[in-house]
Image: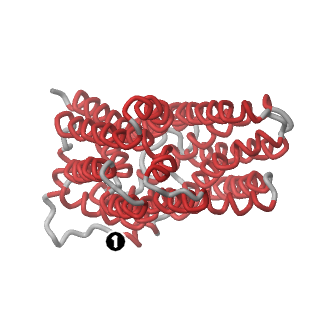
């Protein structure tokens, strides 16, 4: 089999495993409050507290450990590390079906955080398998899978929970992760250059995590990833309430909010997919700055929205902007990392993303308590400043394959 065939097969394996894994997670986690009630937690405040702690524990721990697991993957191989992570998810999700108290769920989510991190490894594996000049397409494909999996997971989970119950749905989620494991096991072939990095002697000169985070332009990429992800996740918690404020009837809020979430995920996936073409036409700094500016414009109009039509239109623009900005930032930063430390490098980038996932719901909730539109105002200011900073930086792309156009 030729190298191009191997690359396509590797990309399919990684993207399919990512889609299945992310769908498996969202298959059960949106119904966690219902599960906590079945475990005997009656008070709404306690349900919210345990659900919040359990959902936040894994990304918080993973944010700290992602660069470390990436470093281990650079030494031992990406495939082995992603298999380790997926097997741990099979075990933890199966164990979730046997818990009898809320703190058991929290404890298992903590354990899950220590062994998670297949998201950044999937990006690394996609970038590693990509032919020269195709890194953006490979990363965009995996990020599209990361978007579409969570978009479809709750729908599948709702049907599964209705048929077998929430407790047994955890077994179905575990089966999803098992499928992802076998996709990687049988279809993914570790590229020779990654294997060479694995065989490097213990005294190799891979840059440390601090050195990777300090590479030229990387601090700005970290800021882009953090604030774009922060803005992306800030909309969800307040959207149902916001729809009520602009006059949507209570009986329609749940359906319309769910529809808008799906629309946002779909437009973000479109941004992930279109981004490689944009990077071939314009320098990466222009793509990132333009996407951040478009995101700022979208949140500005969200703050000023007076009806459902305007909210829907700006939601489409916002999703497309965030998807484009994230793919461009990951691709350009990934091109700056040496091949022998790319796993750790993507781990550093993902730490910024996971930190935003942990911080954004809390900050958004606090701001919304003051004024519901304050969340959109913060997003507008943050993305607007980000667009200006990137535009002024006008970095030079580190590798020809990152973007065809050079500034």
The answer to whether residue 16 is above or below residue 334 is above
Residue under the point 51% across and 50% down: 33
Determine crowd level at label 1: few under 14, some 14-19, many 20+ residues with C-alpha closer than 10 A. some
The answer to whether residue 370 is above or below residue 283 is below
Element at label 1:
loop
Count of numbered circles in the view = 1
Position of residue 120 measured from the top left corner of the image (x, y, whole percent): 38, 52
Position of residue 260 measured from the top left corner of the image (x, y, whole percent): 65, 33
Quarter occupied by residue 385: bottom right
Residue 133 seen from this side: no
Residue 298 seen from this side: yes
Residue under the point 75% across and 51% down: 376
The answer to whether residue 367 is above or below residue 405 is below
Viewer-closest of 65 and 47: 47
Position of residue 79 measured from the top left corner of the image (x, y, whole percent): 22, 48
Viewer-closest of 134 and 344: 344
Disc 1 target residue: 208
Residue under the point 27% across and 33% down: 7
Which part of the image, by quadrant, shows the N terminus? top left
Q: Please give left or right for residue 32 compared with residue 186 in the image.
A: right
The answer to whether residue 159 is above or below residue 303 is above
């Amino acid at each position: 089999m030729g190298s191009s065939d191997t690359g396509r097969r590797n990309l399919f394996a990684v993207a399919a495993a990512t889609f299945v894994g992310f769908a498996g997670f969202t298959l059960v986690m949106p119904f966690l409050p219902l599960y906590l009630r079945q475990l005997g937690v009656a008070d709404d405040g306690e349900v919210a507290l345990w659900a919040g702690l359990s959902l936040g524990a894994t990304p918080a721990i993973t944010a700290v450990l992602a660069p470390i697991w990436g470093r281990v993957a650079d030494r031992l191989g990406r495939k082995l590390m992603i298999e380790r992570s997926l097997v741990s998810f099979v075990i933890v999700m199966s164990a979730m079906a046997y818990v009898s108290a809320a703190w058991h769920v929290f404890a298992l989510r903590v354990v899950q955080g220590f062994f998670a991190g297949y998201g950044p490894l999937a990006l690394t594996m996609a970038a590693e398998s990509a032919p020269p000049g195709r890194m953006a397409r490979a990363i965009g494909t995996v990020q599209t899978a990361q978007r579409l999996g969570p978009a479809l997971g709750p729908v599948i989970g709702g049907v599964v929970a209705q048929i077998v119950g929430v407790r047994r749905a955890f077994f179905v989620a575990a089966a999803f992760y098992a499928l992802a494991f076998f996709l990687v096991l049988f279809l993914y072939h570790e590229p020779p250059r990654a294997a060479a990095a694995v065989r490097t002697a213990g005294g190799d000169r891979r840059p440390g995590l601090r050195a990777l985070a300090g590479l030229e332009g990387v601090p700005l990429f970290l800021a882009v990833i953090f604030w774009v992800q922060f803005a992306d996740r800030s909309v969800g918690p307040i959207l149902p309430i916001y729809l009520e404020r602009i006059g949507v009837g209570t009986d329609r809020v749940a359906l319309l909010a769910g529809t808008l979430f799906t629309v946002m995920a779909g437009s973000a996936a479109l941004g992930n997919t279109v981004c490689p073409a944009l990077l071939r036409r314009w320098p990466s700094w222009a793509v990132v700055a333009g996407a951040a500016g478009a995101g700022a414009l979208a949140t500005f109009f969200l703050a000023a929205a007076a009806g459902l039509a305007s909210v829907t239109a700006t939601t489409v623009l916002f999703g497309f902007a965030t998807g484009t900005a994230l793919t461009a930032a990951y691709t350009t930063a990934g091109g700056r990392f040496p091949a022998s430390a790319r796993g750790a490098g993507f781990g550093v980038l993902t730490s910024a993303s996971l930190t935003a996932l942990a911080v954004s719901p809390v900050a958004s909730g606090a701001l919304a308590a003051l004024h519901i539109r304050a969340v959109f105002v913060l997003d507008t200011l943050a993305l607007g400043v980000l667009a200006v900073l990137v535009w002024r930086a006008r970095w030079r792309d580190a590798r020809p394959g990152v973007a065809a156009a050079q500034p």
